[in-house]
Image (cartoon, rainbow, N blue to C red):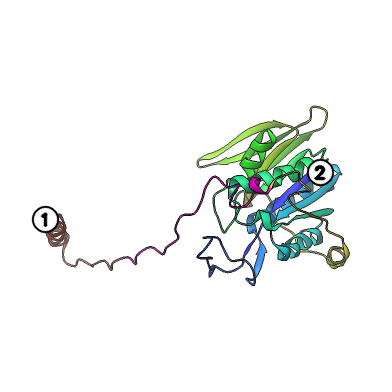
């Protein structure tokens, strides 16, 4: 079984800064971690490998510092890592990002399953996973809380997809993409042996040319959505407390509403 996990390195703090010229996050020099939801995807990939055997690969698109996230994934039991890094990728929206990741998955070849966290904590769009599946033309299941069965005879997997009021059971044929929620497992801690292996492991870097893309396919030029303006919302006005008996409070409330309506 050949599994690819797509992860993202995100700012560890909520105190992020925005580049006023590009309207994108300034990631350089900011303490970063693996996107928390991606940790569950990493753990599930390792568990599937342990149960069914096979190979796991983690990929991320990001600046040089994203190498730390890849090595952490390796320390948790992932076999190989690939770093997608190129100045041409800077400023990519979810469409361009999913295209770059999809091209990397195609380059890896013979992939049975792609696992992603349900969304990134710094964007919260939940669009990259489904975008990858769309570019690849693969079946997908989002918000998966459990992978029930892997059937190699029929090249399929059965999983439970979380809904607002319950869940649904889906059967997907290989190759497929699954985004997972935190209910799926409990991520493990890295072992000392895993840390030592991750520190020594060579991580290849693929740029836009290695993926067979053009500069206009990624980055700001390859992004159909653009951030026009970023601003802080105006502070909320202080509310008021209406005291008195229920009838008195109702009369006071109606009086205040009339003031604002007239």
Q: Determine which of the numbered discs, if any, sits on residue 46 in the image.
A: none
Please give the range of residues in magenta: 215-236
Q: Is residue 218 visible?
A: yes
**Nearer to the camera, 224 or 166:** 224
Q: Quadrant of residue 199?
A: bottom right
In percent of width and height, residue 54 lies at: 86, 44
Give me the residue at 79% from left, 64% from top.
190
In percent of width and height, residue 10 lies at: 63, 62
Q: Quadrant of residue 99?
A: top right
Q: Earlier in the sequence, mark 2 or mark 1?
A: 2
**Nearer to the camera, 236 or 227:** 227
Residue ID for mark 1: 262
Q: Marks 2 and 1: CB-CB under 8 Å?
A: no
**What distance separates the C-alpha of mark 2 from that of mark 1?**
66 Å
Does the stretch in magenta take in 234? Answer: yes
Is 67 on the left or on the right of 96, as rendered? right
Q: Determine which of the numbered discs, if any, sits on residue 108 in the image.
A: 2
Give me the residue at 71% from left, 62% from top.
66
């Amino acid at each position: 079984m050949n599994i690819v996990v797509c992860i993202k390195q995100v700012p560890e703090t909520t105190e992020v800064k925005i580049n006023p010229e590009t309207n994108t996050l300034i990631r350089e020099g900011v303490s970063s971690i693996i996107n928390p939801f991606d940790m569950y995807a990493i753990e599930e990939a390792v568990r599937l490998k342990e149960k069914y055997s096979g190979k796991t690969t983690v990929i991320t698109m990001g600046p040089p510092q994203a190498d730390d996230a890849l090595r952490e994934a390796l320390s948790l039991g992932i076999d190989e890592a690939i770093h997608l890094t190129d100045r041409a990728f800077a400023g990519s929206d979810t469409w361009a990002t999913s295209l770059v990741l999809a091209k990397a998955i195609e380059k890896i070849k013979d992939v049975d399953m792609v696992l992603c966290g349900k969304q990134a904590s710094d964007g919260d769009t939940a669009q990259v996973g489904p975008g990858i599946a769309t570019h690849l033309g693969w079946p997908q299941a989002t918000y998966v809380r459990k992978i029930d069965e892997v059937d190699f005879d029929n090249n399929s997997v059965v999983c439970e997809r979380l809904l607002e009021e319950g869940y649904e059971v889906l059967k997907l044929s290989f190759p497929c993409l699954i985004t997972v929620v935190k209910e799926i497992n409990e991520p493990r801690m890295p072992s000392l042996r895993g840390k030592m292996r991750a520190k020594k492991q060579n991580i290849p870097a693929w740029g836009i040319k290695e993926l067979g893309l053009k500069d206009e396919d990624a980055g700001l030029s390859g992004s159909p959505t653009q951030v026009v303006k970023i601003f802080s919302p105006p502070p909320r006005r202080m509310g008021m407390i209406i005291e008195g008996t229920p009838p008195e409070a109702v009369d006071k409330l109606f009086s205040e509403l009339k003031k604002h309506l007239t």
